[in-house]
Image: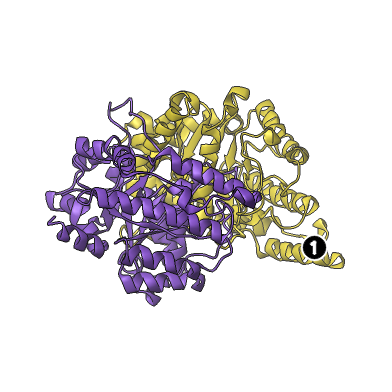
Chain colours: A purple, B yellow
């Protein structure tokens, strides 16, 4: 079985974006604020948006199951206040949940949180609880920078975030550390902000003792870990200079990297440098990079081709494709077993 | 000949830091502001600070020449106003110049600029002119984020920066794009902010047509290009999606990467992915990562060992070690020739 741990609902029916535009307009002019119930999308529309896109490509590429969360760039936690984020997160999570109910053998949900800049993350707990208990979400996406590129939140090691971590530990769900759209003109969203956030999050963990406080907390760092595996020697050296344990001991019980790296040399480096137990298959398809690589003739984000071509043993490949995901996401494992998978 | 294009004066005599501390105290209390002339460091002190450190290691490792600029983390352009930066940059550049005069066969200077957040970069021109014309500087260090991690400046593609670029083109000097200390608690300086800035700068160039306006402008992106080579497929795909030319054509006449990547797999990726003409040897020694790698028994920043072990042809290695640097830094080439090197 091949599990893609990083998929977003980037192909939702247009009505979702239209509703969001009305909501944003409603921030300035409350008379225009739409009610949640005004978003009407039928099951047929959901089904079509998936069958023609993600599911079609999963079948073409041989991917069986995708962990499916709301579109990352649309989370845009910097827009509006907590109430705006709360309504928006609830709608997006519900849509993803409905998709997973329509295709229970192919999609398993992960939740976005109603984060808002300067607001206590504890306010996200009710949505998290609902998504896990009622919707069967197996993970959350946690945005380390709800300001959208201004980086005004405390580091992930700060007690600010502990209410979320306590709930994650209670439910045994991991978090993918994933920012959203950059509203800072310095940072291109998918070409800089995403990768920077991955590197930043890793370093915030490295300089801290967060995982002493939460030994079972698990973070998945997407996009192949940003700059981290490429600079693994730098990080090992910095940890040593900071009198931290070796990275395997200090961080790798708790931090995992996905394989959203869109060329063969990058995947080769990732699988050479990072212990295989910490590498989880993902493509973020359909996502930031949708084109066909003229050098290979295949989609840049067809990461399965790179894993298949990488110099890893068959049992290591099976870990990357399936067993690591089942271990890091115990509720995914349970959901798959419930489907007989 | 082996040229290290990325060295900073991280070992300056303590008097420099003491003077800077007094200067910083003087921002709040002008009565305490020291005069520049109060910094007194003798040639013997300079000589010793180099011979015991950088020059010793250069000899041990077989590095002949280093492009030498003020300590990057100490630039701290976010501290004080333009006048503070201006005085500080002048002192630091003068010290580096004196070092290069003491060791003219081993060190060639590059200048920091007196940047200050929100201040027109044109204000840096007099220092740049002095450093090139009087001190023989062969390059500048340009900080794309003088705010120190708040990223309040326009992107490098903005006309804001054009006065600097016009002078660079006139003098035919490249800029290393190098941030300084992060004062944003989100970003560890050497573990996140430096790498993020490298990635950010590359993407700012990618999304723009800056090099159409300045076809001979040259940027060196340090620390192996941040996350860029590891995610080369992502960047190729994003360029394609943005209808930009292939990266070789779009950026690689103007952008170069150094080899400050502190483990063998990273250097192997860099030399596999990036055309050899765009890779310049560097170690940033003595810099962010000073320890000995327990996996190899050698210093993390002894990057010559990785280049020597990389799978590159002898003529490619010579480009990385010498001829690329002479081409990208024409004033370095002239300075070396003047020394008979």
The residue lying at 19 percent from left, 44 percent from top is A311
Q: Nearer the viewer, residue B94 or A207?
A: A207
The x, y position of residue A22, in whole percent, is 55, 45
The residue lying at 20 percent from left, 35 percent from top is A60
At numbered mark 1, what does the secondary structure look like: helix, strand or loop? Answer: helix
Q: Is residue B95 above or below residue A294?
A: below
Q: Farthest residue to the bottom: give it.
A: A213
Residue picked out by circle 1: B27
Chain letter for the residue marked with disc 1 in the picture: B
Q: Nearer the viewer, residue A140 or B76?
A: A140
Based on the displayed image, in which of its 4 quarters is residue B314 positioned? top left
Based on the displayed image, in which of its 4 quarters is residue A256 positioned? bottom left
Q: Do we see residue B225 in this rendering?
A: no
Q: Nearer the viewer, residue B255 or A211?
A: A211
Horizontal relation, residue B274 to residue B3: left or right: left
The x, y position of residue A91, in whole percent, is 43, 53
The residue lying at 77 percent from left, 62 percent from top is B23
Q: How many marks?
A: 1
Horizontal relation, residue B156 to residue B297: left or right: right
- Where does the C terminus of chain A fall, quadrant-wise? bottom left
Q: Is residue B304 above or below residue A240?
A: above
Q: Farthest residue to the right: give it.
A: B31
The x, y position of residue B246, in whole percent, is 43, 25
Q: Do we see residue A312 in this rendering?
A: yes
Q: Is residue B285 above or below residue A301?
A: below
Q: Nearer the viewer, residue B146 or A6?
A: A6
The x, y position of residue B79, in whole percent, is 71, 58
Specify few, some or many for label 1: CA neighbours under 10 Å numbering under 14, 14-19, or 20 or more. some
């Amino acid at each position: 079985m091949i599990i893609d741990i990083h998929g977003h609902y980037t192909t939702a029916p247009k009505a979702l974006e239209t509703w969001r535009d009305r909501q944003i307009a409603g921030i300035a002019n409350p008379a225009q604020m739409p009610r949640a119930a005004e978003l009407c999308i039928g099951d047929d529309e959901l089904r079509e948006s998936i069958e023609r896109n993600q599911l079609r490509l999963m079948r073409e590429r041989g991917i069986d199951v995708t962990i499916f969360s709301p579109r990352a760039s649309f989370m845009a936690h910097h827009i509006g206040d907590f109430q705006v984020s709360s309504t928006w997160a609830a709608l997006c999570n519900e849509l993803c949940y409905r998709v997973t109910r329509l295709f229970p053998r192919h999609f398993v949900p992960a939740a976005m949180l109603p984060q808002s800049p300067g607001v206590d993350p504890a306010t996200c707990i009710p949505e998290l609880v609902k998504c896990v208990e009622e919707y069967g979400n197996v993970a959350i996406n946690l945005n380390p920078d709800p300001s959208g590129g201004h980086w005004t939140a405390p580091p992930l090691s700060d007690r600010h975030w502990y209410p979320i971590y306590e709930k994650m530990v209670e439910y045994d769900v991991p978090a993918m550390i994933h920012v959203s759209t950059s509203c800072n003109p310095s940072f291109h969203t998918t070409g800089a902000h995403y990768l920077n956030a991955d590197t930043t999050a890793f370093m915030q963990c490295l300089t801290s003792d967060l995982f002493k406080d939460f030994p079972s907390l698990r973070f998945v760092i997407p996009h192949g870990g940003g700059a981290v595996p490429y600079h693994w020697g730098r990080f090992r050296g910095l940890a040593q200079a900071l009198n931290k344990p070796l990275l395997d001991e200090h961080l790798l019980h708790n931090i995992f990297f996905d394989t959203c790296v869109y060329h063969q040399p990058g995947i080769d480096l990732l699988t050479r440098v990072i212990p295989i137990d910490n590498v989880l298959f993902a493509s973020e398809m359909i996502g930031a990079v949708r084109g066909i690589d003229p050098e290979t003739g295949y989609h840049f984000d067809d990461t399965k081709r790179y894993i298949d071509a990488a110099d890893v043993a068959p049992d290591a490949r099976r870990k990357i494709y399936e067993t690591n995901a089942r271990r890091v996401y115990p509720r995914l494992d349970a959901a798959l077993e419930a489907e007989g998978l």
